[in-house]
């Protein structure tokens, strides 16, 4: 391995370590309670190394949020893709989103701190690039097949996405372990009402 490729590998390792440790800290304590000094100490790097990769704590958080949203999106897509029928894909994907959102780390980073740190508009842009895009594609497919009554996809996507995000936030505050199953059942009934 050349010196240049060794340095590139070391830089990438430093970046991964910063993301891993900041994600752990943000999930455990929330964005506001975590300082840069704590992040660099946990990662075993200097502040200079952190600033080489990220201009600010907010930029570092944004990278962590993108990582979490991508992972949730991949889990949802994999669960949906495991189904053969497009309707079953929609239902399974929506249930998988709620299940993934029940993870306290995901709740803290994606649903609580995400909109607060980045602002609603930027958070929605990131959400639309992952889960909302998949939801819109599924709805479009179902409308084309006649499973769902033809209607504008964008408002329906936002209504369903907003309902699921709100349910996920409610689940985050719930102490009842049965609330996830009850919420998924209510979501199934809501989705069923869309069928033609």
Image: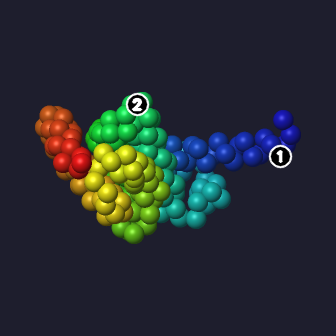
For residue 38, say whether it is visible: no
Give how far across and how far down residue 185 sits, in percent: 17, 38
Mark 2 → mark 1, Cα distance in angstroms: 47 Å
Which residue does the numbered mark 2 point to in the structure image? 84
Most extreme residue toward the right is 2
Element class at badge 1: helix
Give how far across and how far down residue 148 sits, in percent: 29, 49
For residue 124, say whether it is visible: yes
Give how far across and how far down residue 166 sits, in percent: 23, 55
Q: Is residue 192 positioned above or below 140 on the image?
A: above
Give how far across and how far down residue 65 sits, in percent: 45, 53
Q: Residue at x 18, y 48 (%)?
A: 193
Number of numbered discs visible in the structure rendering: 2
Quarter of the view holding residue 34: bottom left
Q: Earlier in the sequence, mark 2 or mark 1?
A: 1
- Density class for disc 1 (Cα within 10 Å; few <14, some 14-19, many ≥20) is few
Q: Which quadrant holds the N terminus?
A: top right
Q: Left or right: where does residue 94 sit relative to residue 138?
A: left
Q: Is residue 112 positioned above or below 72 on the image?
A: below
Q: Residue at x 43, y 66 (%)?
A: 122
Which circle, 2 or 1, is nearer the viewer?
2
Q: Left or right: where does residue 85 sit relative to residue 5?
A: left
Q: Residue at x 55, y 48 (%)?
A: 18
Residue in front for this viewpoint, 138 or 26: 138
Which residue does the numbered mark 1 point to in the structure image? 4
Residue in front for this viewpoint, 131 or 106: 131
């Amino acid at each position: 391995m050349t010196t240049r490729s060794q340095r590139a590998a070391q830089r990438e390792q430093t970046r991964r370590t910063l993301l891993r440790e900041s994600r752990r800290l943000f999930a455990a304590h929330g964005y506001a309670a975590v300082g840069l000094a704590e992040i660099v100490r946990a990662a075993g790097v200097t502040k200079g190394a952190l600033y080489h990769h990220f201009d600010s704590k907010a930029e570092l958080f944004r990278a962590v949020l993108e990582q979490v949203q991508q992972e949730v999106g991949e889990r949802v897509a994999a669960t949906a893709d495991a189904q053969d029928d497009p309707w079953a894909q929609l239902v399974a994907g929506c249930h998988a989103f709620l299940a993934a959102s029940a993870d306290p780390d995901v709740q803290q980073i994606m649903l609580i701190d995400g909109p607060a740190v980045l602002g609603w508009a930027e958070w929605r842009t990131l959400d639309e690039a992952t889960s909302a895009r998949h939801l819109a594609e599924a709805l479009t497919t179902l409308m084309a097949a006649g499973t769902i009554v033809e209607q504008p996809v964008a408002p329906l996507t936002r209504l369903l996405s907003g309902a699921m995000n709100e349910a996920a936030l409610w689940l985050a505050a719930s102490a009842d372990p049965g609330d996830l199953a009850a919420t998924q059942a209510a979501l199934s009934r809501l989705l069923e009402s869309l069928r033609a």
